[in-house]
Every structure is written in C-alpha cells, then in structure tokens.
Amino acid sequence: MSRILAVDDSTSMRQMVAFTLKSAGFDVAEAPDGVEALEMAKKEKFKLVLCDVNMPKMDGITLVKALRQLPDYKFTPLLMLTTESGPEKKLEGKQAGATGWLVKPFNPEQLIATIQKVIG
Amino acid sequence: MAIDITRFHQTFFEESYEGLDAMEAALLRLTPASADAEAINGIFRAAHSIKGGAATFGFKAVADFTHLLETLLDEMRSGERETTPVEIDVLLRSVDVLRNLLNAARDGQNADAAVVGRLADELASVLHGGSTSPAAASAPPASAPASEGWRIRFEPKAQLFASGNDPVRILRELASLGPTTVRCDTAALPDLTDLNPEACYLAWDIELRGSCPRDAVMEVFAWVEDECHLMVAPLAPVAPAQPAAATATAPVPTPPPAPAPAAEPPKVVPLAAPAREAAAGDTRERRSEPPRGEGGSIRIATEKIDSLVNLVGELVITQAMLQQLASGLDPVQHEKLFAGLSQLDRNTRSLQEAVMSTRMLPVDFVFSRFPRMVRDLAAKLGKQVRLVTSGEQTEIDKSVIERIADPLTHLVRNAIDHGIEKPEQRVAAGKDATGTMRLSASHQGGHIVVEVADDGRGLDRGRILAKAAERGLPVAESMSDAEVWQLIFAPGFSTAAEVTDVSGRGVGMDVVKKNIEALNGAVDIASEAGKGMRVTIRLPLTLAILDGMSVAVADEIFILPLSSVVESLQPRPEQVKRIAQEGTVVRVRNEYLPLIDLREWFVLPGPKMAAHQSIVVIVEAEGKKVALQIDDLVGQQQVVIKSLETNYRRVRGISGATILGDGRVALIVDIGAVVRLLAHPANGVGIAA
C-alpha cells in the first residue's frame, strides 16, 4: 500500500498529522524538512504529500516545486499545510504546483475528511 | 472519529519552549546592521510554528498573541519595515510574555491578562505606527442566501492534472452536497492522434439540487479556481439557452449555460509521465542553513538515564567482585579466565563512560541565559556591558549544570552591579566605556573549570577588611589577598554602599560557595584593583562517580575524594604536637595542621595508635588544610556514589557511600563537613558507632 508523506518542522504538528492519518487507516511517513522529504520521495513513491510551508533548510513551496519536477510526482496530490490563509501564499503554492492546501488550525476530523476527498 | 489531541500537548510545549529560546538567542544577535532576511526568517519561523501549533491544539491566547508577533516579523522579513532597536526590544519582551502564556497554558491557568494586554497593545501600536498596511482584511464575502440549487459550468484548463487535481474528486465532492446531474462536454476533445494524454480536454455542466450555500460550492473549487473557467449561478426554474463557450475566470454569477450534450464523465486516468524532465530536479535545493548540530537526537526521560547509570554502577561493582574473587586463583591455570576478566574490565569501563556521556550536556545550556540577562541588567543600571563567552560546548553532567546555574547567575549579577563601572567612570579611568564580562568553560584534568571575569573596578581590600571587622569576623592587616577575598563568602557579607534592586543584599556569595562546595567543587577569586576580578569555579565532571583514595581505619574502608587530597605522609614523632585548645597538630613544612584521628572521629573500635606509627593524609577544603590520621592506604579507585540519604539517612561528615568489590559498604568522607565541624565543634561529631 502506498503511503502518505507528512512534512513539518514542528514535531507536535507532525505527530498530530501522522497519528490522525494512521488512526484513519493510512500509512504515514514523516520528514522534518523539505530536504529530507525530497530525499525520501526519491526513494519511495508516496501517494500524497502533505507539507508545511515554513520550514528550515527547504520550505514547502520549494519542496512542491522540486517534487513536481520528479516524474513520479507529476500528478501526485501535493497539499500544503498553511496558517497563511492570505491569497499570496496560496497563489505561490499553486504556482509551484501544489494541488491544494489545508489551512491551520484544523482539527483531526477536517484533516481526515480532506485527505479522504483527495485519495479516498 | 474522536482523536484526543491533548496527547500532543507535551511535545508542543517542549518544541515551543525550544523555539522561544531560539528566538531569544537570535533576537539578541540581531542588530539593525545584521538584520538580513535570513536572520529574521529564522525568528519568524519559530513564531510561526508556535502560532500554528497553539491554534491547532486550542491555546487561543498563545495563538492570538503570536499572531501579532508574527505580523511584525513578517513586515521586518519582507523589508516593509526597518529593524530598529525599538522592534528588537518589543520582540524580546514579547518572548517573555509568550513564555508566560505558554507556562499558563501548560499549567491550565490564566496568564496575567494585564501584562499580556499591555504588550499586545504595544505590539499593535508598533505595527500600526509604522509604514504598514494593517493586516489585509480578507473579509469573506457574505454568503449569499441559499437557493434551491446551482447550475455550474466547470471548464478546467488543459494543465489541470499538472497540479495533481482530479476533476473526478471535484464532481464527487459536489455530489456530496446534494443530488447532481452531470453532463460532460467533449466538444474540445481532439482526434486521438493529436491528443496529449496529460491534458484535460473535457468540461462539465452540473446541476446541483438542494439548499446549500454558494460558499460551500465555491469551497469545492477553491483549489482549482485559477485552473479552470467556472460559472456558478442559482438554479432558475427555467434554464434559458446560453452559448457554451462563455468564459469567466472570476466566480461571478453569470447567466447559466445551456446543458451540453449528455455524456457520463469519462474517468480520466493520468498516464505515467514520460521521463524527459527527470534530470531537471533539484537545482534549487538550498543547503546553506547554518549548521545547527542536530544530528538526530531523541528525548529520554532523565529517570531512564539515571537507572541506566545505576545499573552500570552495579555492573562495575559486580565486575570488581569477580576481579577480587579471581585474584585468589592461579593465573597460569586460569589464563583464559583472566583474559576474559580483563576484557570484561575494559568493556565495563567503556560502557560506563558511554553511559555517563549520555548525561553530559554542553555548558551552553547555562551560558545561553546570560546574553539576555546581561543586556537587561546593563540597561537597568545604565551601564554598557559586552558579554564574551567561550567553551560553550564543554560538557558537564546534567545535574551539575542545573546546580551551577544559580551560582553563576549571582556571580554575573554581582560583576555587573558592583564590578563594572558606569561608562563615564570607565572613561575617566582610561578604560573602554563598554565593560567586558567573560564567561568561559574548559576541561582541566578530571575537572571542569568555569570562569566568570569582568574588567571592572576589582575588589576593594580596605573596604572588605573594614566591613569584616565591623561584622566581627577575625581579620588582620597582614592577611594575604587570597584570604581577604575569601571573606566575601561569609554569610551576609556585602560591601555595597547601598542595597540595589539587583544585588548588594549580601545573600549570594555565601550561597554561591555553599552550592559549589555541595558539588565537590571549589571557588577561587583573583582580583586586581582597577583591572577587574575573576571567579574561578572548579567542578567535578560528574556527581555519580568519584575518584577516591581508599584508606583503612580499624576494620573499615573509607573513601577520601581525591580532589581534596593534598599529600600523605608518615610523620616523625617530633612533627606531632599537642597544643592547648587546638588539640593535636602536625607540622608539615612550617605549617601547623590540625590532626584528626579518624578512628576517634568515627568512634571505631581498636587501640589508639600514635600518629608516627600510622599514616597521615593531608586534605584541603574551603581553603583550610587538615591532617587525617588513618591506619593504612589501600588504593586509589573510581567509586560509584550511592546516596546515604536515600538509602539510610543523612550523616554529618559523610557525603555518601559506595560498594566495594568484595560487597562491603565504604563511606565517603565529606572533607568540607569535617573542616567545618572542626571549626565549630559545638555541632557535634559525625556518627556515633
């Protein structure tokens, strides 16, 4: 079964996302920043990538851009977790190739509903 | 499904405190000159994470306050706002408030609303006073009243799939809002030969029945708004005819389109992409982040490590026991056993070192609190102080670190308050107007040495002597400088002309000394009038293991901490004298040292021996030397310290116990306590049998 990759530099958010998705029956891998996520994505084809925007080393926008360049991720849903509900960040994300976004704060139910909509 | 998110609170708090520390450190480094985007971005990121987590985990007060902070940082980051000391200052104070808010959230209490409100107001006024636009009010359009349904024309652009979106998902989501009738418009579909399998050629007309609000419909298309032409119009009872080619990118209600030729939406399966762009991958990767020395770590509860240390201690004891048992065997006959034992010895030692090293933390853990403190104190006292730290990476046992934090704080406060002069005084004395505080740590042998030095006015010998005399301490003009400096460690001693808010109450130096000595450490002072003073703290690397000298008294073995042992000798009869009131003394190189017979001291059985027939070990603590009379020197060994207090009860004159190779318990002599008891015999002797 293919897995979901959750990328966030905040351990608590990552744990929350991973735990929530696992309890909804998804298999989840975690990465703390864009650089590591990209490495992992090159080794394994994830079914969906959920990533934070603000991260050290490589931010979410750069990650999405880099992932879209990979043949394996040409059509993969790439979702951004963002607190910035302002239009610029979303636009920037979309231009980088993101599929969509999930605005923080979200509760576990919203997260599951969104993921199920995309890959359910 | 209910998921209890409180389980993540602990992690959230831990990382938030870490984030705050990082913010604080970065802010202290930040100057208007050094305020580049990268530096501010790091601070912004920390604030941003705290805000995101706080909002997610339901700490509204934290999230709201951080939002203000984040807005300010965002303006600074984007260059909209210049970074001036005003911003840095308000940000630093915000960090404090945020820490209080987090504490309150963690403890389930309410933070001091007045303080938070005041700073929030201040942040807001900084925000709006600047050349900034107030947070772009993204007032959502008032949701239109629900109609009986919606007619939707969804015409994706050809590149829709490239963002990972799938029209099927959107249609499915619409269907979840109410009963839908979907017609697929295949008019734009080219011949198979011209068809690009990665492009989307289809469009859909959807009739959604039911009273869902317009916002709900728009929400479904939120992700693809810019990747399609979309029209959403209320479902009218009669649908007027309309050309199908209408294109409006904005979600403006337009006349509803005519139903296109009926067709079920074909499921579009994106084919695997050809690998032509494969190599274009990661040229944009940035790895220029300054190294943070993270190298993969995990959090472990201290108790787990302590129990590991304990177990290793037991292993060391077992190993010593085996060694001792084997010593009775013939090495030739049992060669293999001996080889195995020596290997066990080596491995045990390595294991012990490895386990002890897990308890070691860089001294930076304490040092990192000082930049802020020095800055605040200096500002408060109208002084200019530069803090220079070195050796932050020197590692010390965690429990030692925790216990030197307070003494160091006292020393730094004292130095800034009393040592470093006001700028005008410094200039008058021909010194740099900015004083320098130096904090350094280094390893020296089995010890760690921490120095707190300043280039202020130094200690005033005359005033200390006068003050000491006033307090009735025994003083003499002939005392050496070192002895005079030791006077400031007397309880309640203060030469400060006036008691300030910061220090001068005379609680402090004696506490410093007591704390350091409780750690088996020592404090030394060096001072030169007009040039400054330096306090040197010498500490053992760890509190769990002690380099000890084992000595025999009667049938018992005692351990003397090697750090206090000066020398051992067998005195000649003429070196030992009895002096009225002073008891017995030993003369060693023109120094008369009080002689304590440990057999008497600890009330052990056996005939009293003359000093010249036994051995005398000279030990030093608190600047005083004492000679201890013992029966025999047994050896020198590392011993694992066991607390006597937790296993038995506190015994004066004994700092702990250890278990010897043969399973016997040996007591560790507290030299400091012995010296003190000797000075104030009224306090009574250590143990009675």
Image (cartoon, coloured by chain):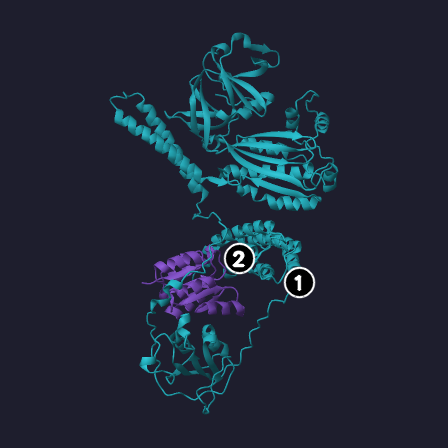
Chain colours: A purple, B cyan
x and y, in percent, of residue B578 in the image: 58, 10
| Residue B154 vertical placement versus B112 (above, below) | below
Q: Amino acid at mark 1?
A: Gly
| Element under disc 1 | loop
SS at mark 2 in the image: helix
Whole-percent x and y of residue B132? 64, 65
Quadrant including the N terminus of chain B: bottom left
Residue where numbered disc 1 is placed: B130
The front one of B58 and A91 is A91
Outermost residue, top side: B574
- Chain letter of the residue beneath label 1 in the structure image: B
Which residue lies at the image location 72% right of the left edge and 25% below the top edge?
A: B469
Q: Residue at x 50, y 70 (%)?
A: A91
Q: Which residue type carries mark 2?
A: Arg
Tell me, for residue B625, which label it has, or none: none
Q: Classify mark 2: residues with Cα within 10 Å, few (<14), some (14-19) or many (20+).
A: many
Q: Which residue is mark 2?
A: B45
Q: Determine whether, in the image, residue B49 is placed left or right of residue B173.
A: right
Please provide percent x and percent y for residue B509.
63, 33
- Indicate whether B529 appears above or below A45: above
Name the chain under label 2: B
Residue at 37% x, 84% y: name it: B186
Q: Residues within 10 Å of mark 1 (few under 14, many from 20)?
A: some
Q: Nearer the viewer, residue B559 or B521?
A: B521
- Return the residue found at the far left: B333
B169 relative position to B117: left or right = left
